[in-house]
Amino acid sequence: MKFKMIHENYNVADLGVSLAFYEKALGLKELRRKEAADGSFIIVYIGNEEADFELELTWLAEHPFKYDIGEEEFHLAFRTDDFEAAHALHEEMGCICFENPHMGIYFIQDPDGYWLEIIPTRK
């Protein structure tokens, strides 16, 4: 029996703000969406051509405020082929929340407080 990871879900307070952040910070674009007929939720899957893996952003009408995500002890990691340019972009966006120069990595934080690890391509 085999399993393939296909997506991870993050609940978001403002779908438009989150979509804009992920497109600018990581180049992730909307792939498809599901909207409840009664307007109670919108689910948007985002991704890029680099991988089949998708991030599922879920907006719930009855939860228009940020979620309590605890102590931020989890994250989604992204490998980049241009670490310096990515760092400069994220620095300009003001979304770098933690850097570990010894390990050669850093983390950015999305509008809802989720941490995203940025890792260089190692040769």
Image: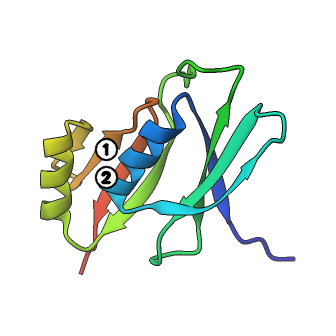
Report whether 111 appears left or right of 40. left
| Extreme-right residue of the structure | 1
Depth check, mark 1 against mark 2: the one in front is 2
Quarter where residue 21 is shown: top left
Which corner quadrant holds the N terminus?
bottom right
Marks 1/2: CA–CA distance = 12 Å
Question: Residue 31, which numbered label?
Answer: none
Residue type of the residue flagged with mark 2: Ala
Question: Residue 107, which numbered label?
Answer: 1
The residue that appears at 31% across and 52% down in the rendered structure is: 25
Residue type of the residue flagged with mark 1: Phe
On the image, the x and y values in percent for residue 39 come to: 76, 34
Labels in figure, total: 2
For disc 2, the marked residue is 25
On the image, the x and y values in percent for residue 5 come to: 68, 65
On the image, the x and y values in percent for residue 23 come to: 38, 56
Report whether 20 appears left or right of 42. left
Q: How is the image coloured?
A: rainbow
Report whether 48 appears left or right of 107. right
Q: Secondary structure at mark 2?
A: helix
Label 2 crowd bin: few (<14), some (14–19), many (20+), radius 10 Å: some
Counting residues from the start of the chain, the first of labels 1 and 2 encountered is 2
Foreground pick, 103 / 115: 115
Foreground pick, 120 / 16: 16
The residue that appears at 46% across and 36% down in the rendered structure is: 114
The residue that appears at 40% across and 38% down in the rendered structure is: 110
Q: Secondary structure at mark 1?
A: strand
